[in-house]
């Protein structure tokens, strides 16, 4: 597991427990069967990642980091607004017949403005400042341009960046208007963390902090059982790991104060072994019902769901009130607040490794490419690799195949 996992779980638990539901509102997104897709959301979540310590990739469910980095290069390196230049199909539904998504993302990056030092587009201006005036306080980019919104296939979700250099470290404050926490909760973090790594390398800096502000952080109704599963399965993993844990291992790695905190945490976990099993079984049954996982057309569970839709708001309130979920929440909070516990429990932090020979931003080669037949494949000359990234397959049933609202 990664530090990013505990940040992710802290965010999702906050939404499940404190989120405001829009079930009484008119909403735009719909599910594949035409049902309105409602959400629980919280306002203004700010997650902070120390990029010097790890590459913040969530391991709780599959994160397609290669496609994520390919997209960030499509936007900021290729400055493209055409899906034919992208080595994935994530933008296809918003493109026109030519593949264009209009005046969005890469198109905005490519627009040039005149400065005292010359004419630059948005990313080249940032690079110029980082290389020439790293103490400058206005290294800002913006993709949410009101006069062009009507010509965009989709309004930008991640839209604003402000860079900062402190003590030779490159920091980024990232603004996002809206985030589908289950489907994309790791995606944008991976992308913009990678962008910081790239810019730091070509500007002779070190990666610093990524501060990620999400104004509307939400969980879709049919995603609730998946989040419940992720939370409980990871809390169960920690509980099992601590049942017969040798405290001398912790004593050799922690300060006296932190060791006492760890001992207290172990005692709290061991005090009452939580009955996660029933809630996990219930959540996984729901995942099958809402996820359409290769089920035969006459599957009774799935047909029953279609006829009798689940009240996810009521389900969410009931589950979060259980003792098992309260205990899971306690474990998440402790693991979030105590970074040293990760090392004590043997969790390795993922690392992004860049090709050290690359000194120009435009020389980074994507992890993905199209072969001679147009098939999307891994790029053998990629400038990127991720080490110590262990995708934990236990837990959420068929994790990569969650339903996606349109």
Image: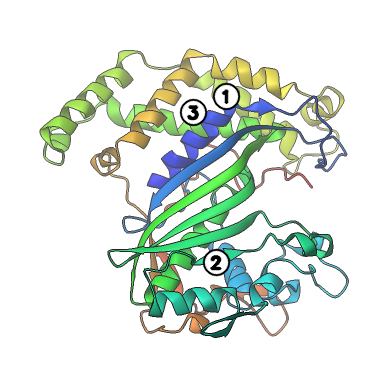
Mark 2 surroundings within 10 Å by alpha-carbon count, few (fewer than 14), some (14 through 19), many (20 or more) = many
Q: Residue under label 1, please give it.
A: 18
Q: Is residue 243 left or right of residue 355?
A: left
Q: Whole-percent x and y of residue 116? A: 53, 82
Separation of residues labelled 1 and 2 (CA atoms): 32 Å
Whether residue 33 is visible: yes
Separation of residues labelled 3 and 2 (CA atoms): 30 Å
- Comparing labels 3 and 1, the label whose residue is closer to the camera: 1
Q: Whole-percent x and y of residue 76? A: 59, 72
Tell me the element at label 2: helix
Q: Nearer the viewer, residue 36 or 401?
A: 36
- Between disc 3 and disc 1, whose residue precedes? 1
Identity of the residue drawn at 60% across and 42% down: 215
Quadrant of the rendered image containing residue 105: bottom right
Tell me the element at label 3: helix
Indicate the quadrant containing the N terminus: top left, top right, bottom left or bottom right: top left
């Amino acid at each position: 597991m990664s530090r990013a996992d505990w940040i992710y779980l802290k965010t999702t638990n906050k939404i499940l427990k404190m989120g405001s539901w829009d079930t009484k509102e008119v909403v735009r997104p719909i599910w594949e069967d035409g049902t309105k897709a409602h959400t629980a959301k919280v306002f203004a979540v700010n997650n902070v990642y120390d990029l010097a310590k790890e590459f913040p990739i969530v391991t709780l469910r599959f994160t397609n980091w290669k496609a994520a980095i390919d997209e960030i290069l499509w936007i900021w390196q290729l400055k493209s607004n055409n899906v034919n230049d992208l080595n994935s199909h994530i933008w296809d539904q918003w493109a026109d017949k030519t593949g264009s998504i209009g005046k969005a993302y890469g198109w905005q990056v490519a627009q040039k403005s005149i400065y005292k030092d010359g004419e630059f587009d948005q990313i080249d201006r940032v690079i110029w400042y980082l290389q020439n005036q790293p103490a400058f306080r206005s290294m800002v980019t913006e993709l949410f341009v009101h006069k062009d919104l009507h010509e965009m296939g989709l309004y930008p979700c991640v839209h604003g960046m402000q860079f900062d250099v402190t003590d030779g470290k490159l920091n980024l404050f990232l603004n996002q208007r809206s985030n589908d926490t289950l489907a994309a909760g790791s995606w944008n973090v991976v992308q913009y963390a990678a962008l910081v790594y790239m810019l730091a390398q070509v500007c002779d800096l070190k990666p610093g902090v990524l501060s990620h502000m999400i104004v509307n952080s939400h969980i879709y109704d049919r995603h609730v059982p998946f989040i419940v599963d992720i939370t409980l399965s990871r809390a169960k993993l920690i509980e099992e790991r601590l049942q017969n844990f040798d405290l001398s291992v912790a004593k050799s790695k922690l300060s006296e104060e932190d060791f006492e905190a760890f001992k207290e945490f172990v005692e709290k976990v061991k005090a009452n072994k939580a009955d996660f099993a029933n809630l996990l079984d219930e959540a996984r049954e729901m995942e099958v019902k809402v996820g359409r996982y290769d089920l035969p057309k006459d599957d009774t569970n799935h047909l029953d769901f279609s006829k009798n839709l689940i009240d996810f708001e009521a389900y969410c309130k009931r589950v979060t009130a259980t003792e098992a979920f309260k205990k899971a929440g306690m474990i998440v909070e402790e693991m979030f607040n105590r970074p040293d516990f990760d090392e004590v429990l043997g969790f390795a932090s993922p690392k992004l490794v860049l090709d050290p020979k690359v000194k120009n931003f435009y020389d980074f080669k994507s992890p993905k490419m199209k072969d001679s037949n147009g098939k999307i494949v891994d790029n053998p000359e990629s400038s990127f690799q991720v080490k110590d990234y262990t995708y934990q397959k236990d837990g959420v049933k068929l994790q990569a195949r969650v339903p996606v609202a349109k």
